[in-house]
Image: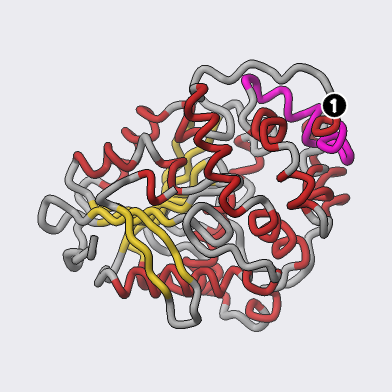
Amino acid sequence: MASSYPGSSTKLTLGDGTTYAYVCIPPSIPRKPTFLLLHGFPSSSYEWRHQIPFLSFLGYGVIAPDLLGYGNSDAPGELEAYEFKRMANHLAEILAYEKLEKVIGVGHDWGSGLLSRFNTWHSDKLLAAVWVATGYAEPGTEPMDIDAINAFTTDRFGHPAMGYWKLFDKPEAGRILDEKPERITSILYPPSPELWKENLGPVGALEKWLNSDNILPSLPGWLGDEEFKKHNKIMKIKGYHGPCNWYKSAIANIDAVHHMGLPEERKYVTVPALLVVPTDDTFFPPEILMMGSQWYRNLRVEEISAAHWAQLEAPDKLNELLASFTKGLESPCVSDCEI
């Protein structure tokens, strides 16, 4: 979470009353651009702990928010608060406050979904964009059909991929996950991505995992015991109700009203884009990520030897890709982060 970075964290209450906490590090080299790092589920700005010091060391600026529902930011209970257009507008307001005209957006997991909608509504604020492990999602107008997606992935890859979404869509989902913090973290950050096929993908499998008395698997080599504990401590601050609302929002597609009649050009990514494709992600294999390649006008694709948590599993490689992709890009202005 943002407060994990003493001296570089700040809080801002926006025009609609929502408060965000975020890491704010200004560029140390003139004209170096700023990265906007958007984490996914279930996480916080702490998920970028390997990227923030690296990018800062190279002279780049960093804005890394605890997104809505997480860490030191607000966690409203109502579903409507998690409308993606609303959250994209929040990001734009933070950037305006920090006097940042353009940033390099980087999204992972649900952060990739939010980056997609930031591209829809505020593409003028993007210098470039990076999607990690989860690709660009074009703005749709229909609710999400989880059963159809599971049928597709079963036919194509031999296993369902989104059964756990059914649990997250239940009204009591947050309470259920709050009661089993170690068990939910152990399966979401597994020692082997193969565990997801049996314990996340099928409908009802996650409930069985959470209610099991089986000994938890060992931690992966890229997640230390203290990091595991800190993650759970961060998630305990606001709980899982808000984070599960990201799923509920997407399943119901509460943003659909904003997407109807959207000009065709607004659906595309026109800035330079990098898609980081993990080779070992069981739910988002390369074939899935490349299905949306037609929406990028200027795309570079790079594979990375990792599963879903590329920024944790292969931080050096991801850092190298971020640095090489953005080399030569200049910011139109310099940030005045108020720390």
Q: Residue at x 60, y 80 (%)?
A: 262
Please tell me which residue lies in front, 124 or 175.
175
Please state if 5 lies on the left or on the right of 1 as rendered: left
In the displayed structure, 95 sits above or below 293; it is below
Q: Please tell me whether residue 314 is drawn above or below residue 247 in the rendered image.
A: above
- Magenta region, residue range: 191-208
Judge whether residue 93 is colored magenta.
Answer: no
Examine the image and state in which quarter residue 151 appears.
Answer: top right
What residue is drawn where x is 54% and y is 31%? Answer: 229
Indicate the position of residue 311 as horizontal and vertical percent values.
45, 35
SS for callout 1: loop
- Whether residue 154 can be seen here: no
Q: Where's the C terminus, which quadrant?
A: bottom left
Residue at the image point whose x is 38% and y is 53% from the top = 64
> From the viewer's perspective, is 69 left or right of 256?
left
Disc 1 crowd, CA 10 A, few/some/many (<14, 14-19, 20+): few
Magenta stretch: includes residue 203: yes
Q: x, y percentage for residue 250? A: 70, 62
- Horizontal and vertical percent for residue 245? 69, 60
* x 77%, y 39%: residue: 161
Q: Is residue 290 left or right of residue 335?
A: right
**Residue 5 visible to the viewer:** yes
Q: Position of residue 36 (x, y in %)?
A: 37, 56
The one nearer the camera, 128 or 308, is: 308
Residue under numbered circle 1: 212
Dividing the picture into quarters, in which one does residue 137 lie?
bottom right
Does residue 322 appear left or right of residue 255 in this picture? left
Q: Using the image as rendered, state which of residue 232 and residue 95 is in the foreground.
A: 232
